[in-house]
Image (cartoon, rainbow, N blue to C red):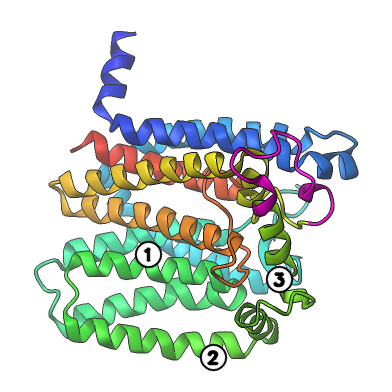
Amino acid sequence: MNRLKRQTKSVDLGLLLAFIILVGFGLIMVTSAAYPLGLKYYNDGFHYGKRQLVFSFLGIITAFIASRLPRDFIKKYSPHFFLFTLILVLALWSPLKDSQGGQARWLKIPYTGFKFQPSDLLKVSSILFLARVLDVNKNRMEKRETFITIIVIIALAVIPIMIKDLSTGAVIAFTLLVMYIVGGIRPHQFVSLVGIGVAVMIPMVVMFWYRVKRIFGYLNPDLAVLDENYHITQSLYAIAMGGLGGVGFFHSRQKYSNLPAAHNDFIFSIICEELGLLGAVFLIIMYFILIYRGLVVAYKSQNYYDKYVAVGITSYIGIQTVFNLGVGCGLFPVTGITLPLISYGGTSLLVTMASIGLLLGVSRRV
């Protein structure tokens, strides 16, 4: 018992507490939001809740292991991990792909029934690898060779996955940009990088007609009859019905038929409907604590590699959270991106929990 107390005291307790609360809160809300789907497809309303419980348990084990990994081990094998995840992303063009909603974002393992999203792994591997490059070149950030190296890494991490999943590619791009800024990007390098990013983003949007339609729907919110506006319209209905205190846990009406993806992409809308503004504020406060404590860990870290890793993990969780909440509130076009630690999904939950495990590991070394 005394040893366990010493171990928990060595990590950032605010970060750990927010982490545990968010995972538990997500488990509860997935059980409610996915209840109709469980009845429809498995004759068991708690089917998805049970699966999320299993994922959460595995995630705790994964997070614990990640928090105990030595820094030198992570740093040494980060290039191998990055290359491996790139290969997995490229496999989305192979027979191993599994298309859902018209998009091939999943890989399926033959004869097992198991499938996962390689983009979730790419988020972490790109952070760990770029942190190594920034650490090695921290005294040569003004060099052209360093700039080109970082540009190549960002391009490899972003462009392939952006073809399949624009929103995830954007999350990775913004995350790596934040890390580069913290690492010491020069003003002219920043301008050049933004220019390159815009030049890449425009064709990524216009070459896929469904992305153009979503943006058109977002820019014309009054056209509620458009299919592209259906998700946002139903999401706003759910949020509006929640009011201050919500309609009550398990009493959402939108999750039964009107709101697609209620248990993953639009789970925030169900939270607002069932728990109201108070539940939404509670959730946002928990995220604020998680992100704030992550930045504190990064600030306090004396090792540059740890600092960059902490900034990257905190940024990716924060950026993805903002994207998801913004879509649910109609501030951004529909992107199909999950809410970290809350939405249903094994790959996303396990990778996010492992990432926070790495962040807790950094906090142990502060």
In the displayed structure image, the side of residue 352 where residue 210 appears, left or right = right
Label 1 Cα neighbours within 10 Å, binned few <14 / some 14-19 / many ≥20: many
Estimate the spatial distance between the alpha carbons at disc 1 and disc 3, rounded to whole Å: 23 Å
Magenta residues span 240-258
Residue under label 3:
103
Q: Residue at x 55, y 52 (%)?
A: 339
Q: Residue at x 73, y 69 (%)?
A: 95
In the displayed structure image, the side of residue 236 where residue 177 appears, left or right = left
Q: Position of residue 152 (x, y in %)?
A: 35, 79
Q: Earlier in the sequence, mark 1 or mark 3?
A: 3
Residue under label 2:
203
Question: What element does badge 1 sit on?
Answer: helix
Q: Is residue 149 above or below residue 259?
A: below
> Residue at the left extreme?
139
Q: Position of residue 335 (x, y in %)?
A: 60, 68
Question: What element does badge 2 sit on?
Answer: helix
Q: Earlier in the sequence, mark 3 or mark 2?
A: 3
Q: Amino acid at mark 3?
A: Gln
Residue under label 1:
175
- Magenta includes 328? no
> Residue at the top extreme?
1
Label 3 Cα neighbours within 10 Å, binned few <14 / some 14-19 / many ≥20: few
Q: Amino acid at mark 1?
A: Thr
Q: Earlier in the sequence, mark 1 or mark 2?
A: 1
Give 226 or 70, whichever is nearer the viewer: 226
Q: Residue at x 69, y 83 (%)?
A: 213
